[in-house]
């Protein structure tokens, strides 16, 4: 028996308020789940029309199940492992514009449509000069959205009260502004009238966003067991963590129309998303990046094992609370709560997050995620942050390519791997040669954008830590750092 409106006794239909470009795991476990929660609490009363952004996708499967699917949320809440199952009933229908473009455009004529959300990957918000006005379907997401908005503009004769609230979720900085830029570029490319351009500019709102929830998607390995537990077939089961955060940069009045925060969802409407982006990058991503070489060389393979280890866990917590957190400008209580949530996420017993997967392109990750905290710490406190510096030294050891008798599966840009290979070939066991290696790496401004040898004391500190790791091993060296 397959999941559908026929077997789901609580099935309801709601007015179509949201057009969603993307039918993948993330949006279904994030936006569509939130809308379902708001509907259940009686504060939204709206459904989602899903538009498939590429030719092959899931809308047929969605329509076969009347838009229904099972969402499993799992993780740590209040210190305890928790796993919940819920049928999400917020999608009204799916449309494949590659087979039915007119139906897609006709949705623009609906009085009830108010929001546009999207997740078409980082490459999705881009301009394609092959997308002329008269072709159907258009290739790019921004071209499709421009055509959709133009149909709406024409149908309603440019009425100001028929503008849209556009909330993209693609993982690029200033995603809302970049999407608006693409819309206006297509309007110019297609020679659309000035009235349409003015309507886009003045009567539509483009919000930049930050999204945060780990979604692992369809649980292939466990699906038989899960379907036995839930008692029906579901080809769209989705799995995500309990934690969620959606920061939306836009006018406060939008919250009245999308009142997710009023029912306790972690959705924030802010004037400037930058502090929240910095918080996520420096804390969540920064702690990940800081822990990798230290924990892996210590003999640990996963994030959960790392944070629960007595010694490595202390190193990670000290780096977070003492060296990363003090470099951020949000309220201290808010940052502390976020750090606590991050560590709960790291301990999620349902997710096996391997350190080697985080180590992909680790040098550029250190530059974007950790180096800003290191430099800001020096700026604020006039001294080096020991744990962040020790992590940098540990990366240099990590890129030597060995953990005892094991070969480390290094994955980075070829020229970075070649740099490390050539430098470590020259190592003769001496402090001076090790200092040469450190100097060359710190000077590699293709990674760092600056010459890190100019940071007072950094070269010496990294060299001494690296020399200690080489001579005494990571475990003894780490004990000294933690004293």
Image (cartoon, grey):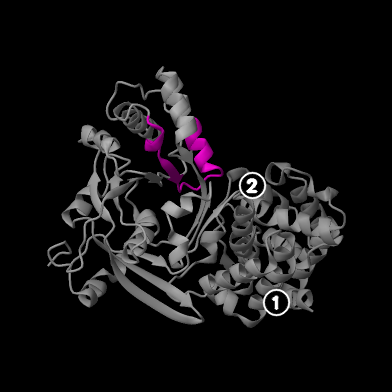
Q: Quadrant of the N terminus?
A: bottom left
Say if the magenta span includes residue 163: yes
| Residue linked to disc 2 | 416
Q: Secondary structure at mark 2?
A: helix
Left or right? Give the position of 124 relative to 157: right
| Residue linked to disc 1 | 475
Say if the magenta span includes residue 452: no
Q: Quadrant of the C terminus?
A: bottom right
Label annotation for residue 52: none
Q: Is residue 208 above or below residue 82?
A: above
Left or right? Give the position of 318 relative to 65: right
Q: Is residue 74 above or below residue 34?
A: below
- Residue segment shown in magenta: 159-181
**Residue 309 in sight here:** yes
Q: Quadrant of residue 183?
A: top left
Image x and y of residue 378, in percent:
82, 58
Q: Is residue 85 above or below residue 247?
A: below
Q: Quadrant of residue 376?
A: bottom right
Camera-nearest residue between 172 and 87:
87
Instruction: Please tell me which of labels 1 and 2 falls first in the chain.
Output: 2
Image x and y of residue 32, in percent:
35, 57
């Amino acid at each position: 028996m397959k999941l559908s409106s026929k077997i789901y006794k609580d099935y309801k239909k709601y007015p179509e308020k949201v057009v969603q470009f993307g039918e993948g795991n993330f949006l279904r476990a994030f936006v569509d789940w939130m809308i379902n929660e708001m509907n259940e609490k009686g504060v939204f009363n709206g459904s989602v029309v899903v538009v498939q952004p590429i030719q092959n996708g899931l809308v047929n499967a969605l329509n076969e199940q009347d838009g229904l699917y099972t969402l499993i949320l799992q993780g740590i809440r209040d210190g305890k492992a928790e796993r919940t199952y819920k049928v999400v009933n917020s999608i009204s229908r799916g449309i494949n514009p590659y087979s039915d473009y007119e139906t897609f455009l006709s949705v623009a004529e609906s009085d009830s449509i108010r929001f546009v959300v999207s997740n078409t990957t980082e490459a999705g918000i881009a301009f394609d000069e092959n997308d002329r006005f008269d072709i159907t379907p258009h290739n790019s997401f921004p071209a499709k959205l421009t055509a959709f908005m133009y149909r709406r503009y024409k149908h309603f004769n440019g009425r100001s009260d028929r503008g849209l609230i556009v909330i993209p979720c693609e993982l690029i900085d200033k995603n809302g502004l970049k999407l608006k830029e693409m819309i206006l570029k297509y309007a110019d490319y297609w020679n659309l009238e000035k009235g349409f351009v003015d309507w886009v500019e003045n009567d539509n709102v483009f919000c930049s966003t930050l999204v945060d929830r780990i979604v692992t998607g369809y649980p292939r390995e466990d699906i038989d067991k899960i379907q036995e537990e839930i008692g029906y077939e579901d080809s769209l089961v989705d799995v995500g963590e309990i934690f969620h955060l959606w920061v939306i940069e836009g006018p406060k009045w939008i919250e009245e129309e999308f009142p997710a925060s009023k029912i306790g969802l972690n959705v924030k409407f802010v004037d400037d998303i930058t502090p929240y982006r910095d918080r996520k990058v420096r804390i969540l991503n920064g702690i990940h990046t800081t822990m990798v070489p230290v924990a892996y060389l210590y003999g640990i393979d996963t994030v959960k094992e790392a944070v629960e280890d007595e010694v490595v866990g202390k190193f990670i917590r000290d780096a977070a609370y003492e060296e990363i957190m003090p470099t951020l400008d949000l309220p201290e209580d808010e940052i502390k709560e976020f750090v606590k949530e991050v560590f709960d996420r790291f301990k999620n017993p349902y997710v096996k997050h391997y350190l080697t997967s985080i180590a992909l392109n680790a040098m550029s990750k250190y530059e974007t995620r950790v180096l800003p905290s290191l430099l800001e710490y020096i700026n604020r406190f006039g001294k080096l942050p020991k744990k962040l510096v020790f992590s940098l030294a540990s990366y240099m050891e990590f890129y030597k390519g060995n953990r005892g008798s094991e070969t480390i599966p290094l994955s980075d840009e070829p020229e970075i791997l070649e740099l490390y290979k050539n430098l470590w070939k020259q190592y003769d066991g001496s402090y001076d040669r090790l200092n040469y290696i450190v100097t060359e790496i710190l000077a590699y401004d293709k990674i760092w954008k600056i010459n890190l040898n100019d940071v007072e004391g950094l070269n010496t500190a990294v060299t001494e830590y690296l020399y200690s790791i080489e001579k005494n091993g990571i475990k003894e060296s780490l004990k000294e750092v933690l004293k």
